[in-house]
Amino acid sequence: MNRGQFRGIRGVTPWLMLCACLCFAALTGAATAASDTPQAKTQPARSWENYFGVAIVPSGRAVVVGDKGVVMTSDDQGKTWARRQLRQGVRYDNLYSVAFNADGSSGWVVGDNGAIFHTADRGTTWTEQKSPANSALMTVAVVGAQQACAAGDHGNIVCTTDGGATWKLHNVGGDIGIFDLVFTDANNAWAVGEFQTMLHSSDGGSSWKIALGGDRMKASDPYFAISFGGGRDGLTLGLSGAALETSDGGLTWKATTLAIAHSSFYAVAALPARAGAYYAAGENGIAALLDNGQLSQVQSGTSNAIAALAFSEHFAMAVGLYGTLLLSDDSGQHWHSLNNSELALQNQGQ
């Protein structure tokens, strides 16, 4: 999808702001695995840099990806970071999403121009894999060490069942941008995107069907994020607080609204060991807890857009535009900056 041609359509502008650098083209050049191990250092404020994805593996390591191929890892809850850029050259592909298998041993990052990188050592080193897509991949979801799917522009979904040795390209048609994808088990996967599109796969990503939306002739608002809890409940979020809820594993969806100043949510995460509870964040630093139908706003301490969230049993991280890098040790009730930038006074434990 050429995002520029949709600039005037209601609903696309917030995502344009979030992915302002989406269409930069990388110069051709050899992609390499980063074999050297960078030293962990305190992360300075980098207000010119955007972060788009974050994951926390069971060991407690946090992995953040963003502008110009940056990958950062921290083993001490963000006190220090080891930083590298994937693919050497004058320009780099932006990276938009990172995900790991259940034990954290195997993971992938994806980004511009169909970029796919794989790690087999919890993010210490990365190797580029051959991608059948040449447009941006916005999201990646991992089932196991061998199985993963990624999706993005032009309705493209790529999946692997052999650890990334080969990727198969699927196209859902309609030139629909896909913003988020999640597996509920090895067989069932869900993806959401433009024109209120929701896609479903019941065979591990081998085939996809449009479950909802997908009509480009209608000026429908996009869905940006989807998450499922430990049971059969799930939540989809989009523009201006638009939302869908399911309590039957996705068989049926009910429309609702998470109305907080008409804000759009770009990220959602089910809280660990807390059935029916979700944390959402998005434009202007908006953050909220949805707990069994009850919505409450939380002060994130930033006015920058939050692009991604990750929760573990011990801490949570949120990342976004203009160097936003936040940590919470109380399930998102309070946040503090990891790069020495100031947060709003109301978020300082008062």
Image: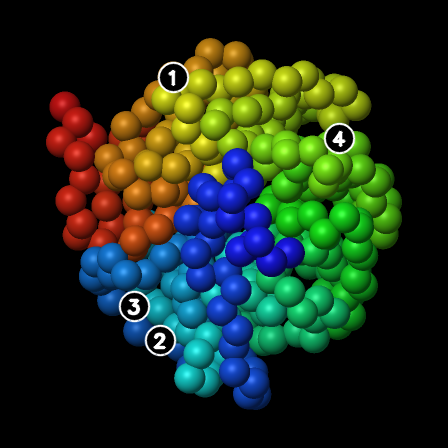
In the shown orientation, is residue 158 left or right of residue 118? right
Residue positioned 25% across, 67% down in the render? 41
Q: Is residue 312 above or below residue 126?
A: above
Alpha carbon distance from label 4 to label 1 = 28 Å
Identify the colour scheme used: rainbow
Which mark sits nearer the N-terminus, 1 or 2?
A: 2
**Residue toward you, 73 or 70:** 70
Residue type, mark 4 in image: Leu
Residue type, mark 1 in image: Ser
Q: Which residue is mark 2?
A: 38
Circles 2, 3 touching at the beta carbon (< 8 Å): yes
**Residue toward you, 105 or 138:** 138
Alpha carbon distance from label 2 to label 3 = 7 Å
> How packed is label 2: few (under 14 Cα within 10 Å), some, or many (20 or more)?
some
Q: Secondary structure at mark 2?
A: loop
The nearer-to-camera label among 3 and 1 is: 1
Which mark sits nearer the N-terminus, 3 or 1?
A: 3
Q: Which residue is mark 4?
A: 212
Residue 289 location (% of width, % of height): 42, 23
Circles 4, 3 touching at the beta carbon (< 8 Å): no
In the shown orientation, is residue 13 left or right of residue 144? left
Q: Which residue is mark 1?
A: 296
Residue 341 seen in the current view: yes
| Screen quadrant of the C terminus | top left
| Quarter holding residue 264 | top left
The nearer-to-camera label among 4 and 2 is: 4
The nearer-to-camera label among 4 and 1 is: 4
Alpha carbon distance from label 3 to label 1 = 36 Å
Residue positioned 53% across, 37% down in the render? 11
Label count reads: 4
Q: Which residue is mark 3?
A: 40
Residue positioned 42% across, 69% down in the render? 68
